[in-house]
Image (spheres, grey):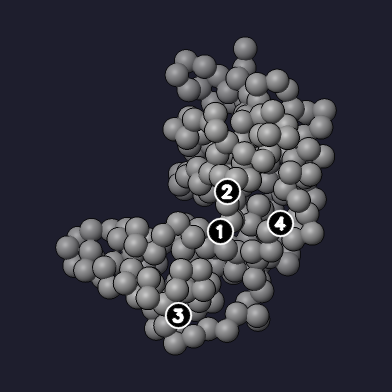
Amino acid sequence: MNQNSILMIDNKEYLRIPIKTKILSEKDDILEIVKKYTEGKIQKGDFISISESPLAITQGRAIPVEKIKVGIVAKILWRFVSNVNYGIGLRSPTSMQCAVDEVGNVRILLAAFIGAMGKVLGRKGDFYRIAGKQAALIDAATTSPIPPYESCVIKGPENPQKEAQRIKNATGHETAIMDINDIGGCWMIGGSDGIDKIFMEKVMKDNPQGQGDELTPICLIREKK
């Protein structure tokens, strides 16, 4: 989805306006990108949504697979990650290695053990509860269709709360950093001090920015009067 769309929440209509940009890189500053591409489009009272992967890319968190040295722990553990219909996640040696790099061997091994015990008990999600947010946010290579990132593992962004607040301080608009996919997964991983997490996860749940090659890392949310 890459065109304006309207969603009704609590008897109010909200317009979602995806903003197209260039392909971002680690040479970009997300704040300057927001200011440049929303100029003349943003209005008083608008909320700003930023996709987590493009933010991570600007922080140098996209790692080419050829630069990832896969260790023994990652070589073993990735095979035990469940197949899911919304992406590869940590079910590849390189993405699992990035998770190890983020949180350490001990925490990953503990998460794997507790996750396995949880499955025996019929419980899901224990691995990521123990491994933590940064492990959960990792996107495997081929997740992004945009060159050169189709051959990169993209780690989750650093300090999403701080980045959202930085954008608000500079623009005056409440800002959220969102992790969203096309099958209904929507998670605000960081937001400015006046943002409503529940509202943002409702208003962005159907992923108005799209999941493919739309190049719309920014979305404005505007109440339709």
Q: Residues within 10 Å of mark 1 (few under 14, many from 20)?
A: many
Q: Name the residue type under label 1.
A: Gly
- Indicate the secondary structure of the residue bearing disc 1: loop
Q: Earlier in the sequence, mark 4 or mark 2?
A: 4
For label 1, the residue is 156
How many numbered callouts?
Answer: 4
For label 4, the residue is 58
Can you say which quadrant of the picture contains the N terminus?
top right
Left or right: 105 with respect to 3? left
For label 3, the residue is 74
Q: Earlier in the sequence, mark 3 or mark 1?
A: 3
For label 2, the residue is 160
Q: Indicate which label's residue lies in the foreground, 2 or 1.
A: 2
As measured in the structure, the alpha-carbon distance from the residue carrying label 1 to the one carrying label 4 is: 11 Å
Q: Are marks 2 and 1 in contact (CB under 8 Å)?
A: yes
- Indicate the secondary structure of the residue bearing disc 4: helix
Q: Earlier in the sequence, mark 3 or mark 2?
A: 3
Q: Residues within 10 Å of mark 2 (few under 14, many from 20)?
A: many
- Residue occupying image coordinates x 69% and y 28%: 172
Q: Name the residue type under label 2.
A: Pro
As measured in the structure, the alpha-carbon distance from the residue carrying label 3 to the one carrying label 1 is: 18 Å
